[in-house]
C-alpha cells in the first residue's frame, strides 16, 4: 500500500497531549493490521534534547540506536510496542545543521540558501524519509509547538506543501482546547475557531479536529465548530479528560477517529480493530483494588514529566500485578538522617532515580543506607545504581570519601569512574554512552531470575561506570556485580543477594517498558514490593 501521511498539529495552548493523540491513532491503526510509525518534529534549535535540563521539556528519552529524544517518543513506544530511532525525532537545529552542511559542501551550486525552499525541502525530506522505505502504511508526524508560534512556521509551510503534493494520501488532525468559563458556566469554542483560521491563513485546511476539554461538548456545539471551520461534523471529535492516557485510544475509537482517517485517506479497511490485549490491560487496571506504594527519590520531583518513563513502567508493572501504584516523590535534596524514617517508612519499595551532578546525591545515600538497613525492596537506576555503590563503599567498606569522579574529581576512592572512552570527550551533545548494549547476567542471581534469561539488551545514557579496581572488595563484602557487558566487562548490574530485593542497573530499563510488554525487572520489583507490603501487614497483625 502506498504510504499515507497523518499530520498532528496543535492550537490555542501547548501541553494538550498531541503525543497521546498521535499514539492513540497509531494504536488504533496497528490494531487494524496496518504498519505504522510516529515521528516528532520539535521547533527548537537544540540539535536534540540531550543537552536540555529536565525543567525545560521533561525527561530525555533514549532510543535503541542511541538518540537522545523528546519524551513523546516514549509515549509512541509505550502505545505501539514498536521501537523508534533517531529518524523519528527531528528538531529545527538538526534541519538547519543538515542544510548548512550541504551549503558548505557546495551542494546548492551557488544558489542563495533560504528558508523556502531549502529549509522546507529538508523538512519534507525528513517527513517522507520513513515512508520512503516502504515499511509503513502510515507515517504519523506530530508537529511540536502551537500554531501561531514563529518557530513552527517552516514546519507548517512544509505541511502545506506536502498536503498539496500528496493530495488524499494525507490528512491533518488539528488538536485544540475548548475552555470552560466557570463564572458563565459555558464552554467556549472561539479559541478553536481562531486557531483553525490561523492554519487556514497558512493554507492548511485540517480535515479532523480533536477538541480537548474537561467537560462534555454538546453535539450542537461540535456542529457549530464544524460549520465555522470547514470540517465535516462527524470529524469534530472531543477528547475529554480521561482517568488514564491509556483510555484515549478507546475514546477516539468510540467516535470513529480511525475510520474517519481511513476514509479520508482512501484506505480500504474491514471490520473493527483488535484491541483484546489493550482491553485486557485496561480491565486489570480498572479491577485493581489494592495499592502498592513506591517512593521515588530524586531531585526533579517538583516536575511532572521528569521521570515519565519510570512512572509509566511502574504503572504498567503494578497493573499487571493487579495493583494500583501510588508513587510518592521524595526530594533527595532535603533528605537527612533526621527525617529519612519519616519520609521513607510505609513505602513498599524505593526507587533511586537517574540524574547528573552533585545536587541531591547526599540525600540519595541517606535513603539507600536506610533501605539497606531496613531491607526494603530498592531499585537504583543509572545514577541511582552508582549511588548504591558509593553508599556501600562509604558505610560498609569504610571508605568515607568514596565517590564518583563526576561528583568529586579528587576522591581517592573513585568507586565510580569516568569511562575510558569518555576521557577525550570535550563536546557535551550526544557523546555519552548511549543506546542499547548487550549485557550478560550471572546465572542464579535475582536479576537473572527476574528476566528469565541471561542475555539481555538495554538502553544507556551515562559517562561514568563502576570502577573495576574495587570489584573484589565489593564482592567480598557482599555487593555482587551480577551483569556485565560481554565485550568490555563494564559492570551493568549490582545486587545484594542477601536482601529482599536490592538491585542497581547502570542501564535504564524504564525506556523499554510498554503497555503490552511490561518490563520484567519492574514486574519483579513490584512483586517484591507487594510481598514486602503483605509481610509488613502480617507483622502488624502478629504484634497487635
Ligand atoms: N551522571 C551519571 C553518569 O553520567 C548517571 C547518568 C544517569 O543517571 N543517566 O554516568
Image (cartoon, helix red, strand yellow):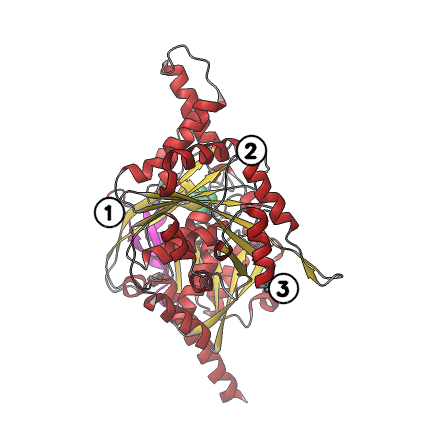
The kind of secondary structure element at disc 1 is loop
Indicate the quadrant where residue 145 lies.
top right
Work out whether mark 1 precedes mark 2 in sequence or the reverse, and give the earlier one.
2
Furthest toward the right, the residue is 183
* Closer mark to the observer between disc 1 and disc 3: 1
Quick check: is 297 in the magenta stretch? no
Residue range corresponding to the magenta coloring: 470-499
* Closer mark to the observer between disc 3 and disc 2: 2
User: Is the residue 247 above or below the residue 299 in the image?
Assistant: below
Distance CA(mark 1)–CA(mark 3): 42 Å
**Quadrant holding ligand 1?**
top left
Determine which residue is flagged by label 2.
Answer: 151
Determine which residue is flagged by label 1.
Answer: 486
Q: Position of residue 294 (x, y in %)?
A: 50, 66
Determine which residue is flagged by label 3.
Answer: 339
Work out whether mark 3 precedes mark 2 in sequence or the reverse, and give the earlier one.
2
Residue at 47% in and 53% down: 21
Quick check: is 483 in the magenta stretch? yes
Q: Position of residue 429 (x, y in %)?
A: 45, 33
Residue at 40% in and 73% down: 284
Q: Position of residue 248 (x, y in %)?
A: 47, 61
Distance CA(mark 3)–CA(mark 2): 46 Å
User: Is residue 281 in view?
Assistant: yes
Badge 1: residue crowd in 10 Å (few <14, some 14–19, many ≥20): some
Amino acid at each position: 500500500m502506498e504510504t499515507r501521511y497523518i499530520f498532528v498539529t496543535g492550537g490555542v495552548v501547548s501541553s494538550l497531549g498531541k503525543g497521546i493523540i498521535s499514539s492513540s491513532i497509531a494504536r488504533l491503526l496497528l490494531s487494524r493490521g496496518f504498519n505504522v510509525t510516529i515521528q516528532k518534529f520539535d521547533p527548537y534549535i537544540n540539535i536534540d534534547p540531550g543537552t536540555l535540563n529536565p525543567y525545560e521539556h521533561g525527561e530525555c528519552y533514549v532510543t535503541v540506536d542511541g538518540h537522545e529524544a523528546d519524551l513523546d517518543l516514549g509515549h509512541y513506544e509505550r502505545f505501539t510496542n514498536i521501537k523508534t530511532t533517531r529518524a523519528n525525532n527531528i528538531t529545527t537545529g538538526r534541519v538547519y545543521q543538515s542544510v548548512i552542511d550541504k551549503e558548505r559542501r557546495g551542494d546548492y551550486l551557488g544558489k542563495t540558501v533560504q528558508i523556502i525552499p531549502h529549509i522546507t525541502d529538508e523538512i519534507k525530506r525528513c517527513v517522507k524519509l520513513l515512508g520512503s522505505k516502504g515499511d509503513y502504511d502510515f507515517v504519523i508526524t506530530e508537529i511540536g509547538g502551537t500554531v501561531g508560534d514563529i518557530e513552527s512556521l517552516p514546519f507548517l509551510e512544509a505541511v502545506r506543501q506536502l498536503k498539496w503534493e500528496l493530495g488524499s494520501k494525507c490528512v491533518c488532525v488539528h488538536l485544540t482546547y475548548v475552555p470552560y468559563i466557570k463564572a458563565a458556566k459555558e464552554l467556549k469554542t472561539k479559541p478553536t475557531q481562531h486557531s483553525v483560521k490561523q492554519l487556514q491563513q497558512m493554507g492548511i485546511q485540517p480535515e479532523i479536529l480533536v477538541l480537548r476539554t474537561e467537560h462534555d461538548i454538546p453535539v450542537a456545539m461540535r456542529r457549530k465548530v464544524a460549520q465555522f471551520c470547514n470540517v465535516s461534523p462527524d470529524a469534530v471529535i472531543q477528547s475529554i479528560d480521561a482517568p488514564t492516557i491509556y483510555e484515549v485510544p478507546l475514546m477516539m475509537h468510540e467516535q470513529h477517529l480511525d475510520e474517519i482517517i481511513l476514509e479520508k485517506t482512501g484506505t480500504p479497511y474491514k471490520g473493527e480493530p483488535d484491541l483484546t490485549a489493550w482491553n485486557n490491560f485496561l480491565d486489570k487496571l480498572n479491577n485493581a483494588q489494592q495499592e502498592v506504594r513506591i517512593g521515588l527519590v530524586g531531585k526533579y520531583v517538583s516536575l511532572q514529566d521528569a521521570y515519565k518513563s519510570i512512572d509509566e513502567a511502574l504503572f504498567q508493572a503494578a497493573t499487571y500485578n493487579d495493583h494500583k501504584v501510588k508513587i510518592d516523590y521524595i526530594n533527595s535534596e532535603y533528605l537527612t538522617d533526621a527525617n529519612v524514617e519519616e519520609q521513607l517508612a510505609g513505602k513498599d519499595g524505593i526507587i533511586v532515580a537517574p540524574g547528573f551532578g552533585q545536587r541531591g546525591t547526599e540525600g540519595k545515600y541517606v535513603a539507600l543506607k536506610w533501605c539497606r538497613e531496613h531491607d526494603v525492596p530498592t531499585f537504583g537506576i543509572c545514577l541511582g545504581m552508582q549511588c548504591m555503590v558509593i553508599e556501600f563503599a562509604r558505610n560498609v567498606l569504610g571508605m568515607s570519601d568514596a565517590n564518583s569522579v563526576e561528583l568529586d574529581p579528587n576522591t581517592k576512592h573513585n568507586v565510580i569512574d569516568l569511562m575510558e572512552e569518555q576521557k577525550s570527550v570535550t563536546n557535551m551533545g550526544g557523546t555519552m554512552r548511549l543506546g542499547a548494549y548487550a549485557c550478560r547476567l550471572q546465572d542464579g542471581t535475582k536479576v537473572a531470575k527476574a528476566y528469565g534469561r541471561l542475555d539481555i539488551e538495554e538502553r544507556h545514557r551515562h559517562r561514568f561506570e563502576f570502577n573495576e579496581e574495587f570489584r573484589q572488595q565489593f564482592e567480598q563484602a557482599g555487593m555482587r556485580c551480577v551483569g556485565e557487558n560481554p565485550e568490555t566487562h563494564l559492570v551493568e548490574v549490582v545486587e545484594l543477594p542477601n536482601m529482599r530485593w536490592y538491585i542497581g542497573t547502570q542501564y535504564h530499563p524504564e525506556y523499554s517498558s510498554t503497555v503490552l510488554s511490561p518490563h520484567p525487572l519492574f514486574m519483579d520489583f513490584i512483586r517484591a514490593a507487594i510481598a514486602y507490603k503483605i509481610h509488613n501487614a502480617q507483622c502488624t497483625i502478629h504484634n497487635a
